Image (tube, rainbow, N blue to C red):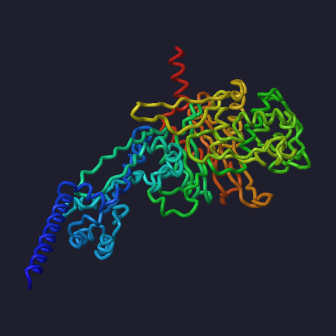
């Protein structure tokens, strides 16, 4: 080898050595002085959301009805795992997944891989204890839990995996309950200090409902369905003086803890969303309108021939009988269709529908529960209205209401003529303090008319609906036996809806109760199904709600007034 070739080799070797030193220096700089930049190249930023803790829902006495439980999204950044095989082996029994499945995910080239979308808190605790557990990302996720199970299901509603209320109070107060989740971007890596993202917690709610009262109402509803062979039903208990709903039950019910495993339609709320033709309970409203407008007095009479024609439609009494000369009190006690139609025609369309609108029909009650229906009440001038509707509406046909609309309307009779807006949330508690419900009211009829209606409805119970009587208490109320409209016109020839609405004590009403039983098989009249179901329930409610009997209350009033 010549000297020239040897010199060339040395030059090349020196150049290669120098280049190697430069490369080593750059690698050292990357790993020591520029490690954050290096990590940013290997690990892309991924979105992180700090989930807010959803507000707790309590009953009126502080019992927990809905609360968050925490689960965890389990994820890794494959590019920074120190020993994938070892980590997969440790995680497999905790996540109850095959090791091969976990290893396959860890071999991904993606910057962020989810190993388990929702793991229980116990699994997260176990992951924190394993070797290299700090390489596993545990993102907390709330899951709604209902410690009372199916109790109050139609009031509470449910929350889905996206932390969104899907029905009931959960849906109506979604924004307040959910608070504010905060999103940001960060690189998931044990080599980098993690960014803290803080959410704003949701508000807590306190309901008007006592879980003990609700439980009793739900049990009585189930018993009534079984006893009378009904396929479904509803019961609402309300304070007529405030509009506060004290209990609200419908069957069938569901467990909001299992919302993702329910059959289609299970979460539909028949208390505020399902509409039906209410039948003879509506005669309370027709009579109240006639009295308040001055069209009749309780002593006004008419000649009942057993049938009456309006707009080409003939209406008959329930037994097809003629009753002759009948006054208004007897009309209501015997629930005579011909009488209801007669006084509706005396009022005329304008007065009749003005009062029905005042009582709240044809629009939502504004209750704080998701998906309330407005019902259906065509009025003169609407394309769907017919002249005959003046007659049929008078006894509760050719219009549709929800159970809540019906009890809300009748509650005005029990509250001196003032209809209170129904509600289920008594308090909202958040970082700004406590906000209490402010009752909304509308005067519908005069106090005198309300007193007359209460007296007439008391007579109706005493004379014709003894099954609704409660020992020791004077009850005012009205039955309803509603036909079920068929989808393509006409009515079901055999099935009915039995209803009863009643309030007590009549001198100072504390509660109003509405019972609705769908398609009972044991009897065809509301007086034989819903009315006794009402009495059975109220006998227990007066004890739970500490409502004294008439004699005790009268004695207390006499004592307070200085009587002997």
Q: Residue 147: x percent and y percent? A: 39, 51
Toward the viewer: 258 or 128? 128
Left or right: residue 327 versus residue 61 is: right
Looking at the picture, tell me which residue is in the foreground, 155 or 19. 19
Residue shown at the point (78%, 44%) measured from the top left: 378
Classify residue 450 as left or right of residue 427. Answer: right
Residue 60: quarter of image = top left
Residue drawn at the location 55% of the way across and 49% of the way down: 249
Q: Is residue 5 visible?
A: yes
Q: Position of residue 375 (x, y in %)?
A: 70, 46
Instruction: Give how far across and how far down residue 435 sits, in percent.
Output: 46, 31
| Residue 315 percent location from the top left of the image | 86, 48
Up the image or down, 485 lies above or below 449; here it is: below
Question: Which residue lies most toward the top here?
Answer: 562
The front one of 439 and 410 is 439
Please name the residue shown 24% across and 66% down the image.
81
Residue 543 at least partly seen:
no
Answer above or below: position of 426 versus 523: above
Q: Which residue is the extreme one toward the bottom?
A: 1
Residue 73 in which image quadrant: bottom left
Q: Quadrant of the N terminus?
A: bottom left
């Amino acid at each position: 080898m010549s000297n020239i070739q040897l010199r060339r080799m040395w030059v090349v070797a020196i150049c290669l050595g120098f280049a190697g030193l430069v490369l080593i220096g750059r690698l050292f700089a990357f790993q020591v002085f520029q490690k954050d930049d290096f990590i940013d190249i290997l690990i892309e930023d991924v979105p992180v959301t700090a989930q807010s803790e959803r507000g707790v829902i309590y009953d009126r006495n502080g019992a927990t009805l809905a609360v968050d439980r925490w689960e965890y999204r389990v994820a890794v950044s494959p590019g920074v795992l120190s020993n994938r095989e070892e980590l997969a082996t440790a995680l497999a029994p905790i996540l109850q997944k095959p090791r091969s499945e976990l290893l396959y995910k860890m071999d991904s080239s993606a910057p962020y891989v989810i190993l388990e979308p929702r793991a229980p808190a116990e699994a997260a605790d176990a992951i924190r204890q394993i070797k290299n557990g700090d390489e596993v990302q545990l993102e907390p996720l709330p899951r709604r839990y209902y410690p009372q199970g199916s109790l109050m299901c139609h009031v509470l509603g449910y929350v889905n995996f996206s932390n969104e209320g899907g029905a009931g109070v959960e849906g109506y107060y979604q924004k307040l309950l959910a608070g504010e989740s905060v999103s940001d971007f960060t690189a998931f890596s044990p080599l980098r200090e993690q960014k803290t993202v803080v959410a704003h917690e949701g508000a807590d709610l306190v309901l008007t409902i006592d879980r003990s009262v609700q439980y009793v109402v739900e049990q009585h509803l189930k018993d009534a369905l079984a006893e009378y062979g009904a396929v479904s039903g509803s019961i609402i208990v309300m304070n007529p003086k405030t509009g506060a709903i004290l209990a609200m039950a419908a069957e069938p019910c569901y467990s909001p803890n299992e919302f993702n495993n329910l059959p289609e339609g299970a979460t539909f709320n028949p208390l505020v969303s399902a509409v039906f033709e209410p039948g003879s309970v509506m005669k309370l409203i027709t009579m109240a309108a006639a009295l308040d407008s001055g069209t009749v007095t309780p002593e006004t009479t008419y000649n009942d021939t057993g049938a009456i024609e309006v707009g080409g439609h003939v209406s008959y009494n329930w037994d097809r009988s003629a009753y002759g000369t009948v006054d208004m009190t007897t009309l209501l006690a015997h629930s005579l269709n011909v009488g209801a139609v007669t006084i509706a025609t005396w009022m005329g369309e304008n007065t009749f529908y003005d009062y029905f609108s005042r009582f709240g029909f044809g629009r939502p009650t504004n209750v704080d529960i998701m998906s309330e229906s407005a019902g259906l009440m065509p009025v003169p001038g609407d394309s769907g209205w017919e002249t005959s509707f003046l007659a049929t509406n008078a006894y509760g046909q050719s219009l549709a209401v929800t159970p809540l609309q019906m009890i809300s309307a009748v509650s005005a009779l029990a509250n001196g003529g003032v209809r209170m807006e129904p509600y289920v949330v008594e308090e909202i508690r958040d970082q700004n303090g406590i906000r209490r419900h402010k009752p909304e009211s509308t005067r519908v009829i005069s106090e005198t008319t309300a007193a007359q209606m209460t007296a007439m409805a008391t007579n109706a119970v005493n004379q014709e609906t003894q099954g609704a009587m409660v020992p020791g208490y004077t009850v005012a109320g009205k039955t309803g036996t509603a036909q079920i409209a068929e989808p393509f016109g006409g009515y079901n020839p055999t099935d009915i809806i039995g209803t009863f609405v009643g309030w007590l004590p009549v001198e100072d009403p504390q509660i109003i109760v509405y019972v609705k039983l769908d398609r009972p098989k044991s009897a065809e009249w509301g007086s034989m199904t819903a009315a006794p179901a009402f009495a059975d329930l109220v006998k227990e409610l007066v004890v739970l709600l500490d409502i004294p009997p008439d004699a005790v209350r009268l004695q207390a009033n006499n004592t307070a007034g200085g009587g002997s």
